[in-house]
Amino acid sequence: MAKKNKNDVYEEERYTLKKTNPALKTLIYIFLLIWALINLFPIYFMFTFSLKSNDEIFGKNIVGLPKDWLWANYASAMKTGNMGLYFVNSIIVTTLAIAISIIAAMMATYAITRIRWRLSNLTNAFFMLGLTIPLQASIVPVYVVLSKLHWLNRYSTLIVPYSAFALSMAILICTGFMVEIPFDLDEAARIDGCGLWGTFFKIILPLMKPALSTIGVYSYLQCWNEFMFANVFISDSKHRTLPVGIKALSGQHTTDWGPIGAALVIATFPTLFVYIFLSKKIQESFIAGAVKG
Amino acid sequence: MKMKRLVSTLLAGAMVLSLVACGNAAAPAASTDAAPAADTSSTDTAAADTDAAAADTTEAVDTASDEAITLEMWCIATESDSNRHSYEAAIADMQAAYPNITLNWEAFENQSYKTKIKAAVSADEMPDIFFTWSCAFLGDFVAAGKVYCLDDAYQNYKDELPEVMLGNTTYDGKHYGVPLTMNIVGLFANMDLLKQVGYDEIPGSYDEFIACCDALKAAGIIPFGCAGKETWCVTEYLESVIEKSVGADALNDIFLGRATWNNPDVGAAVDTFQKLVNDGYFDPSGIGLTNDEVKANFMDGKYAFYMNGTWNCADFAANENFKDKVKVSEFPVINADKAKLGQLIGGPSDTLAVAASSPNAAKAADYAFELGKLICHYGYLDGCGLPAWTPYGDTSGINPLTQAVSEICAAADSYVLFGDTAMSADDANTYLSYVDQVYGCQVDGTQFIEGLANDIR
Amino acid sequence: MADTKTKKANSIVAQKRRKKIGTGISIFLFLLPGLLLFVSILIAPIAVSLYRSTYDWNGFSEGTFIGLANYKELFTNGSIKFMVALKNSLILAAFSVFIQLPFSLFLALLLGRKYKGERAFLSIFFMPVLISTVVIGQLWLKIYNPDYGLLNTLLDALHLSSWKHVWVGEVKTALGAILVPTIWQYIGYHMLLMYAGVKGVSPDLREAAMLDGATNWQVDRYVVIPIIKPIIRVSVIFAVTGSLKTYDLVRILTEGGPFQTTEVPSTLLENMLFLRNRYGMGSTISVMLIFLCFAFALLISAAFKEKEY
């Protein structure tokens, strides 16, 4: 740990760039700030949306601050909408799915990129097939199999398909990172008497830390908002996840949008906070990754 | 394919019955107000009805076997659905009346439920009781042999549920569904705006109606609001115009595949509708709006008229600012030679059905009837729709809009079910895509009828 | 003598073979978890789809085998709108590769240069990706609303009322109205991916280039971009396959309308599978979609390889 910090400082010192033209620099900052505002706007919009009534949402006051701050929207999202439970379910499902896909992807990528064998390229292409498969197409076949196995209405009903769908992307990102690790390290490890497994666990995995956060973020995106599988595979509300729960807030002919806004805030804000908190770590890991070269 | 044909021809037969039927069923709705208790709130009635239900129970479900069973039910009465309360109240009553039967029910969002139930039917994972739409939607499941036949169970409910109400869920002469509430298309009007141009009532004749629209337009008021992004909203207008031009029987024959679409009268009616569009009676922004947005605009006083399902009654009546301004009526007759007042668009569509795969199918069937009766009862009291079952108890507390609709139905002569419900799924989508093009003036009446005659198998 | 030699040789060969077998087993074990998940959840359903695409089947009754008739109908029956859908998603793919990705790369390179607040900017730029498409869709509906939408209000304020449109309802503007938010939302997605690559470039290399008198832009152009090429390739593949599979925003903004001019393959697929009860045709569309995505992914990989040598 201490060693790493020293490295960071060392690097920080060396990382000096040429002075940029100050006018250009200001211009760039103005640009960055404007772009930041554009990207922050949806968050403001979502938050105010969640405190309004249908009257304001449709026409009277679309982007202003709410006239009456309807905190009751949150109460109804939590109480009648049951968002608390769905949130926990989503966390369980997403976390485990990410974990499984990361482990499986790391192992597969190792076999594909760092062991020399004839079919490695083909295997890689095979896994890439996963990027091309539309989710809708597999709903019914997977559902039929799951139902034959009496494997519905559990957390694992969603975890397994989610990790499978996140796998291709995880392998793709992993490959990008793993090919960057110098092959000398493997040979050195082998000379030291490490087998394939030893090399994998002792040498490669620790160096793949920066990839971990990237894969995590991208797998998260695939799982957290997934609606189709969650809707079809889960029929008891005990195991429902957020997207289905939020959708269930709208009625056949009547929809109260305020509580939906509140539910969306409940679904999104915690992850935003976690992301901001983690982004420091994520970026440190990127920089740590830079040391490897 | 063959089966489908068969079903639709049979359905056609059934619909004829239902035409006559709906009028009868709605008649007592308006006249059963003679209940003793004056101005009872719905909770009071609920208590009284529980007893009634409990009394029925003993005879309906054979109590010989006391073993406890659990039934699963899926429906679309989500928290913010207007039917939620009627489901909750009905299920509470049922649980009190049948302590042996535990009902586990789950509600799903309307659109995604269609995906869910179809996948469940494919995988044989249906719950014991499930919500479905009548006619073609349930028909496909019946044709695949996945639905339990309710003929035996129905014997106990003949007196309370007129057989004609089962028309939309009868296939091959057998009954497969328990109807809940029914709805028709209503012409809702904002009377404040109509008064501004000198009308105290919704015009009764088509010429007057058009004159009224012209006056509205001249006064800078948009006559019609219609959500072009949701084609079913366009059909609410178009089907009414066609029906009031060619008559209910002709339209029914076409919807149910007994007559060809290639009917010049229909083409002329479509042109009539398109003239309304071209004359600028519709909000030009409508093509980019959802129904939620259009409905909000209507309640906000942007449009004079809004043609949509009578399920809106409860919402309109619940809005303090709006409830005194709104009135509902029937679309005026366009061609008096072929059509007349009392020919309506709508009918019972919301239905409960029992899965053939259910281990307790027979008990589930009885349960579905009892539950359907109660949901219908409470739904009617809440103003969510008109009752498919013979109404009982005190109905005087029902909102005036729903009561007005009941009067329209009481005088009804025949019903044509919503086109997209009546037709098979594939045909309905082809139909909707043509309706979309009519509204956008991409095709005219002739192209519409010829195109549909070609594309619908 | 000779005997022992051959014996020795034999034992070496045997040892090698044993080692090879050992490596083979290891490879298999490394791949096993991934393969298990992948084959059971993704590949088997494709096989089922392939089989079902040769049937006229509604999803629950008995189906009838019709050979390749579905494929033929897909391309010849104009009312299915498959070609329109394909065209739309290819337009989206083109915009995404030629506008979205360069912009993402630009942001990634800019932030890679250690500006003050780099971390905050990075987090903020990524936020639209984390927000549910429902919110993004609702927001853009409010922007496009013909009566009180921000865009038309703005045009009024600028005295450009003649430019006003019913953005999501008119044939001319509907596709554009989908393109803008889709491309905007995922700029951050590709930016983060590229940023990770940019940060992976060794500072030594940068510094060496700087000492040779290169400007920031030159360093980016000649040092950074070639190194992060594998990641750019990943981004291009994501952008293209993602465009072919677009779904959410189309559903919310236009529902494929007006007159089905903004349908994309995924909306058609869902309509066929679950709305029109044409499971066979739905399967056909999904097979076509998979085939196209895979073909594009291979093409892109090949294009990048060619450039390398």
Image: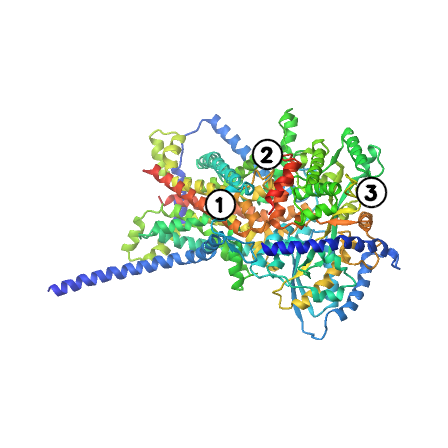
Q: Position of residue B109 (x, y in %)?
A: 64, 52
Residue C257 falls in image quadrant? top right
C103 displayed left or right of A55: left
Tell me the quadrant of the picture where the C terminus of chain A can be found. Answer: top left
Residue hosting label 3: B324
Residue hosting label 2: C171
Q: Are marks 2 and 3 on the same chain?
A: no
Residue A19 visible in image: yes
The chain to which mark 3 is attached is B
Secondary structure under the numbered disc 1 in the rendered image:
helix
Give the Cα separation between the discs numbered 2 and 3.
39 Å
The chain to which mark 1 is attached is C
Q: Are marks 1 and 3 on the same chain?
A: no
Identify the mark at residue C72; answer none if there is no mark: 1
Q: Nearer the viewer, residue B397 or A80?
A: B397
Q: Position of residue B121 (x, y in %)?
A: 59, 59
Q: Amino acid at mark 3?
A: Asp
Q: Amino acid at mark 1?
A: Lys
Give the Cα separation between the discs numbered 2 and 1.
28 Å
Figure disc tally: 3
Compare marks 2 and 1 and give the one earlier in the sequence: 1
Tell me how the rendering is colored: rainbow
Q: Position of residue A239 (x, y in %)?
A: 59, 59
Secondary structure under the numbered disc 2 in the rendered image:
helix
Q: Is residue A88 above or below residue C220?
A: below
The chain to which mark 2 is attached is C
Q: Amino acid at mark 2?
A: Val
